[in-house]
Image: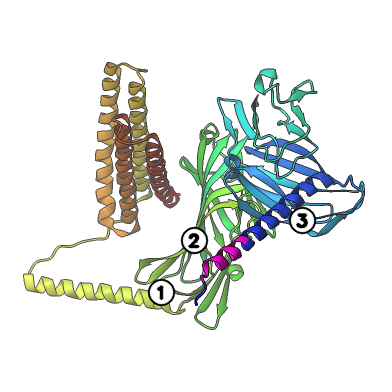
Amino acid sequence: MKKDPLPLIFLLFSLISANLAVNFVSAENTERSSSINLSVNVERKIALVSGGYITINDTLIFLNPGENEFTLTNYMVGVPKNYSEKLIYYRAYDGRSDLSVAVFEDEDFRWLNISFLEPVILSSNETYNFTITLVFSDLIWRKSANLFYAIFPLYPSLTHEASFCNVTLILPSLAKLSENNYPTDVFTNKTSDFRVLYNVTSPLPPYAKSSSWVEFSDTTFKILKFLELRRELSIDCWGNIFATDFYEMETVNIYSIDVVLPPEATDISAYDAYGKYPKGRLDIENANHGTSVKIYLSEKLENSERAKVAVSYMLPPQKYLIMEGWQTFILNINITKPDAWIIYRVIISITLPEGASLILRNNATGLNIETINPFQEKIVFERYNVTKFENLSLSFKYQYVVFWAALRPTLFAAIIIGSILGFLLLTKLTGKAETSLPILISAETLERLVEIYEEKIRIASEIESLEEQSAKGKISRKQYRLAKKIFEEQLSSLQKSFLDLKAKIEAAGGRYADMIRRLEAADAEIEDLKKSILDVEAKYRRGEISAEERRNLLEEYKGRKERAERKREEVLLRFKEEIL
């Protein structure tokens, strides 16, 4: 007779469940034992540093109050989820060396699991300590001209209770505040200028998520965020390397910026939207790690909350290009960058000489190959949230026939001769001909084009500002209509002048005509996105979309609009380089 297997299955399941329960209780008891047998004290120092960052140094001190030895192999420190996205750097170390840090997340925290180089064995009343450094961005912002507001995690998040936690908040040296500028139920002041505040908590409960804030005034406090670094490199047929860096920054009280170019950079020039910087505004210093350039910003950018600067230079081929055989080249380049805690977006593009073809590349993520024309390729590398100590380097191998430089003009000459022969043949057949001479574009024409285009952008911005003021009721409808009519007449006149110059430049053909097309494409995209933003707001007012959908759509459209505006400004900077 066949036995029923169900009782055996239930028995096996019960044994497994019991075993899991025993293991779970054992682990829980181990954690409780750890928290009882080990005393943890925390010294937290929070500093608001120039540039707009908050640094936190947590020193954790472990004491074994028991009679038996205690072994410590790792320890976890957490950051609440609402702050974890702002965490841009972390480092753990003790008195001997750096410690390994592994990161994982749950629903409420990002955990930093610090592993010690070797087990820490604590005898009775023996102590051990290590420090973890955290750097946060985007937690300080300007409320008005010289008034700043900061928020921060008040305590570290631990998995066990700490005996006590001492918190010291250190403000900038010239900061001014009073008792109304911080929560007095959280912090105490022991100084005459309120520049150092204190908090003592005992005990510190596990999984702490408390936040705090401070408000201060400071005429010298700086905020500098590098939103984007775009580096464009091009290699010509002789191996010369030409480069232009475009920097987009958010600035408060910034009068100069420091950038780092690759080592041995030469022929260095800097530009902004208002023109080329004189040499007196650049301090250049060469070092092994790179060429440091301090750029003293023009007065027109000093009061701007956003600044865009371009730096052009050349690199020596003998340092960056290695020749293998007679037609294979290797390009090795380290991506130097400003000494900033984070750059939110880095784009590197490398245009190979005409006739070159990529045969080997490194396996960097964010890498794309673009075809410029049938004879030319461009390598594009893109990364987000590049931190201060992150080293980026690119290495590429490409094939290039050295006599291509001579072959290309020969092909070009053959095309011209063929065109002339075809023209003569057509003339012979039709009995008439039209003479066409190449059109040269003067620097004055390009300068006038840039002036007109920038004036168009300025007036368009004035019209937008006017519409906002009218919508908020700050000006009457009559004032709005009159001012808008004046602006539109100016815009119409500028557009006519632009179209005349555009026709002249397009008749000449070449890259200037292509740059005009890129300008107009960017403008068309900007106008489309403006309409999309207005459409989203209208749908939200009619109740057709939710607040979250509105926020997501606006974030997407505004991001695309900013990228299109950057493209437009880069083309204008290119025109200015041609003029100068």
Most common SS among magenta residues: helix
Residue drawn at 46 percent across, 71 percent down: 237
| Gap in angstroms between the C-alphas marked 3 and 2 | 30 Å
Q: Is residue 327 left or right of residue 20?
A: left
Residue 183 occupies which quadrant of the picture? top right
Between label 1 and label 2, give the one nearer the viewer: 2
**Extreme residue toward the bottom, this view:** 325
Q: Is residue 579 above or below residue 201?
A: below
Between label 1 and label 3, give the one nearer the viewer: 3
Query: At which x and y percent is residue 50?
Result: 66, 37
**Other residues around mark 1 within 10 Å, as few (<14) / some (14–19) / many (≥20):** some
Query: At which x and y percent is residue 9?
Result: 55, 66
Q: Is residue 7 magenta?
A: yes
- Of residues 206 and 335, which is closer to you in this image? 206
Q: Is residue 408 magenta?
A: no
Res. 98 mark: 3
Q: Which SS class for mark 2?
A: loop
Query: At which x and y percent is residue 92?
Result: 74, 51
| Residue stretch in magenta | 4-14
Q: Is residue 580 left or right of residue 462?
A: right
Q: Which residue is mark 1?
A: 355
Pointer 3 with pointer 2, Cβ within 8 A = no
Q: Is residue 289 above or below residue 520?
A: below
Q: Which SS class for mark 1?
A: loop
Between label 3 and label 2, give the one nearer the viewer: 3
Q: Amino acid at mark 3?
A: Asp
Give the mark, 1 or 2, whose residue is nearer the N terminus.
1
Res. 366 mark: 2
